[in-house]
Image: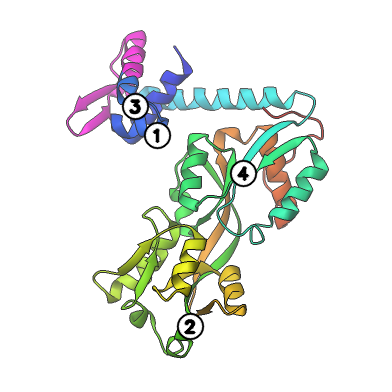
Amino acid sequence: MELYQLRTFVAVAEEGHLTRAAERLFISQPAVSAHVKALEEELGVALFTRSARGMQLTREGLALKPKAEAALKSVGEFLGEARSLRENLTGELRVALNTDPDLLRVRRLMDALRGAHPRLQVHLPQSSSNLIIEDVRAGRIDGGFAFVAEQDIGRLPQELDCWLLDTTTLHVVAPTDWKGRLEACTWQDLAQESWVWFTDACPCRSLLEHRLSPYVREIRKVAVTDYEGTLKALVTSGAGLGLMHRDEALGWERVGDVCVWPHDHLPIGICFLTRSDRLGDPAIRAVRHALGQVWGLAAEGAEVPAEAEAC
């Protein structure tokens, strides 16, 4: 029996569909089918019933799924503990940023990490919240920041550990020549305007849609983007309204690039995400410890020995 077979079994059980499990695992659908078939043959039991609607766990599959999850968790803990026994925290750590580094306190984070672990190389790719969530889940990056609505934290994939660092607010931004008319606008008025919109998975989209949908059947979208630079360019050109976090919106307003609607805002969580099965990894423990210092928080398991090595 191979670990990849157990991972595939759990993925198919959770997704209920071979194609979705293949997408989640980044392998082909035939490979997923082969993993399941090989595991069933080795165990001598059928784990799933197959139908046009998908894959359903059999009685035996239901009984074995918790055992498979426990085995995978134990392996992750074993690997993390093995890494912690090495002598120096070295290697590379990939932590994705979803927005302005100043809002995320990245400079202070890097100062704390360099002071404690000067040989650890930290890469900081820029991305968007929805992509970071999937990249962390798939293991393409070690961790990342994301905006997550507080009510959605518990709905994230179970493989993820989501640490709420702080909350900020999202504000409606408009071209500067809208300032006079914006003063009198309500959400009902804003719902009639054109918008620079967000992709389906972006948490900002659901929050904004909740406020606008009672007043309009179909929101007018001039463009769809998760990139803040594109949003700013379109808003300043007069293409439509946009939504940005407080610090960036007020900063743009101070330099005269946009005006900010003054009447309401939407709360959003600033979160740090990593895989739950990597919480024992010394590099993850190091970054969580540094985040706790920077944000004035305590994270269980964030302490890391001064001498330990990452993969």
Which of the marked residues, 3 or 4, is nearer the chain's N terminus?
Answer: 3
Mark nearer the N terminus (4 vs 1)? 1
| Residue 294 point in image, percent of width and height | 73, 55
Q: Distance between the residues labelled 4 and 1?
A: 20 Å
**Where does the image place residue 118, in percent across and percent down from the top left?**
80, 38
Q: Is residue 297 above or below residue 249?
A: above
Of callouts 1 and 2, the N-terminal one: 1
Gap between marks 3 and 4, in whole Å? 36 Å
The residue that label 3 is drawn on is: 62
- Tell me, yes or no, whether the highlighted magenta stretch contains residue 164: no
In whole angstroms, how far apart are the C-alphas of marks 2 and 3? 51 Å
Circle 4 sits on which residue?
95
Give the spatial CA distance, label 3 vs label 1. Answer: 21 Å
**Left or right side of 44 for 130:** right
Q: Tell me if mark 4 has few (under 14), some (14-19) or many (20+) residues whose alpha carbon lies within 10 angstroms of its own.
A: many
Q: Which mark is residue 24?
A: 1
Q: Quick check: marks 2 and 3 in contact, CB under 8 Å?
A: no
Residue at the farthest left position: 52
> Does residue 107 sit above or below 174 in this rendering?
above
Examine the rendering and report whether any part of residue 159 can be seen: no
Was residue 54 drawn as part of the magenta stretch in this picture?
A: yes
Q: Distance between the residues labelled 1 and 2?
A: 41 Å
Dot placed on the residue nearer the N-terminal end, 2 or 3:
3
Quadrant containing the C terminus in the rendered view: top right
The residue where tag 2 is placed is: 263
Mark 1 and mark 3 in contact (Cβ < 8 Å)? no
Residue sitting at x 76%, y 31% = 89
Kindly state the secondary structure of the residue where label 1 is placed.
Answer: helix
Name the secondary structure under disc 2: loop
